[in-house]
Amino acid sequence: MDRLGQSLKANVKTMKSRVSKYAVYGVMIALAAIFAATLLNAYFQTGGITPMALLQAQQNNATLWILDAMPFIFAFWGQQVSSIMAYEASTMVIDQTNELRTQAAALEYQAMHDATHDQLTDLPNRVLLRDRLDQAIHVGMREDRKLALFILDLDSFKEVNDTLGHYSGDRLLKHVAMRLRAVVRGSDTLSRLGGDEFAILLPVIKENSDVVVVLKKIQNAFQTPFMLDGLKLEVQASIGVAVFPDHGTDVDTITQRADVAMYAAKQNNQGYIIYSTDYDKHSPRRLTLMGELRQAIDNDELILHFQPKINIRTNTVTGAEALVRWQHPQHGFMPPDEFIPLAERTGLIKPLSMWVLKRAIDQALIWHGNKLKLNIAINISPSTLHDMELPDAITGVLASCTLAPHHITFEITEGSIIKDPARALEILTRLANMGIRISIDDFGTGYSSLAYLKKMPASEVKIDKSFVLDMLENENDAAIVRATIDLAHNLGMKVVAEGVENKETADRLAELGCDILQGFYFSKPLAPRQFLNWISDHTPSEKQSTAKGPESPAVSGRK
Ligand code: C2E
Ligand code: CA
Ligand code: CA
């Protein structure tokens, strides 16, 4: 019997003995009543109390007989009731305990499930796929068996998203997931890696030709057009396959090689490609970049550029956004869009984010040392945001420096918040409680409403540049900008417009009440030295600037 069973038994025993105790009191009261009634009876009948008179009272008085039966009734009743009550209580406790156990198990399962599954399709996510691939590789090594990893990327998904909208794009992804589910076996893992990318793990294959059978099945699944809003959509996928142990013997290599094969399939319009070293030539950049990025972080090949953020009303620089670049020894200067998504895939985003954080804070400390009290804005990528260790890592960085947290802004994209709002809220609240300012970046692209985001402890909304760039020509974009400014102000948040490329846009944004501007009209992102030069070029001479002092450089003219 388990511990719960034993303690239940003990509880039942205690309860029974408590109820029995009251039954004993009942018996004693009944005995006392019999004794008193017999005494009274004997006294009234014979005028005295002798043993003979007592015996007579008992023999002649029928009412006393009823009283005599009471102790037995009490004793019997006490036993019965205590047994029934104790039994009922124990079953109640058992039922409730079981209920609680079921609920706790369900909650635990749900939390586990959420962390390892994609919200949209409910398929295993990248984390779970990695884990299963790792296990399959171990089994494969032990039992000398092969396995295959497929990576699929939908062709022209972006067009679907752009023309039919995000909602239809999501529905298409669900349809694709459903069709792929029908292709794989129960022992295989079908996973959504993110965006329009899926993966299939076949944990055991006999020979490489088995892969082709599955590839054909996948292609068949895409043969019938997808129906969406009454439209027939022809959707194809490019598939890359890597086999263990032929193409790699660890998770990263197998994943990279399936990825290279997928990329080659996409470029060659070939439907699918099984990896071979030949394809490394077709995508040397992609393959080698992944390996080089880790070294780049260690070797300081990454650099931060800074773009000023300007307060419209005071015409002063309030802060700067840190934007990472990679000075690659062969490929030259690389923009973040080329390697941040890669870093996200390979798990390198964590060291990269920590590098950016430390460097950006170091730079802010240098400015503060020069009496430039600028706020530093740091981009936090989606996977970094959902990393539960982030707040602790940040606390560590902040503890070792003297920059006050309110001089730091974290720019979090709207998309990464709506990916898992509950978790985002938890982490953002912890960061905000530390005093760090939170800005909702790329606002307007995540298809959420401001009302929904008001729960987030954000102090700033950053309107995505796609709306700002065209706002003078495109009435829709202008309406979005206007509505965002009004709503954000109603919620007590500041509004930043990014992508301000000309004076007309800056003036229009000022009229609409926008608070802070950022864009090429003021300055491109600049290396630290150029940034300082820009600040001094745009700070009015001593005489003009005395009113503001050097703490917030005024933007007196634009280049
Ligand atoms: P973002 O956070 O939306 O950054 C703004 C991007 O707009 C920057 O591109 C910036 O150079 C560009 N930009 C600024 N003003 C203008 C303008 O007037 N017109 C136009 N057309 N573009 C303008 P960049 O530096 O290439 O960065 C691209 C994206 O890469 C960033 O988008 C951000 O999502 C990501 N990123 C950059 N640095 C980091 C980083 O350190 N960590 C993380 N996680 N992501 C970063
Ligand atoms: Ca940003
Ligand atoms: Ca943006």
Image (cartoon, helix red, strand yellow):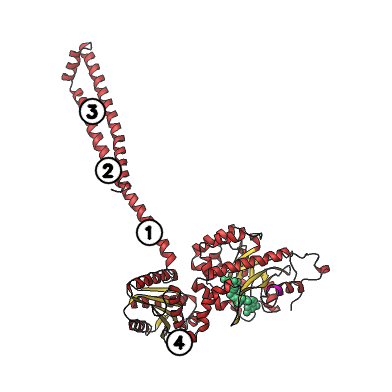
Residue 356 in percent (x, y) is at 60, 69
**Mark linked to residue 71:** 3
195 relative to 298 in the view: left or right: left
Task: Tell me how many marks there are.
Answer: 4
User: Residue 530 occupies which quadrant of the picture?
Assistant: bottom right
Query: Does label 4 point to a residue whose CB lies under 8 Å from ligand 1?
Result: no
Q: Residue furthest right?
A: 543
Please name the predominant secondary structure of the magenta segment in the image.
loop
Q: Indicate whether 211 appears above or below 495.
A: below
Q: Disc 4 versus disc 3: distance between alpha carbons?
A: 99 Å
The question of residue 521 being in magenta is answered with yes
Q: Amino acid at mark 4?
A: Asp
The secondary element bearing badge 4 is classed as helix
Query: Does label 1 point to a residue whose CB lies under 8 Å from ligand 1?
Result: no
Q: Is label 1 in contact with label 2 (beta carbons under 8 Å)?
A: no
Q: Disc 4 versus disc 1: distance between alpha carbons?
A: 49 Å
Q: Identify the residue under disc 1.
A: 106
**Mark linked to residue 229:** none
Q: Earlier in the sequence, mark 3 or mark 2?
A: 3
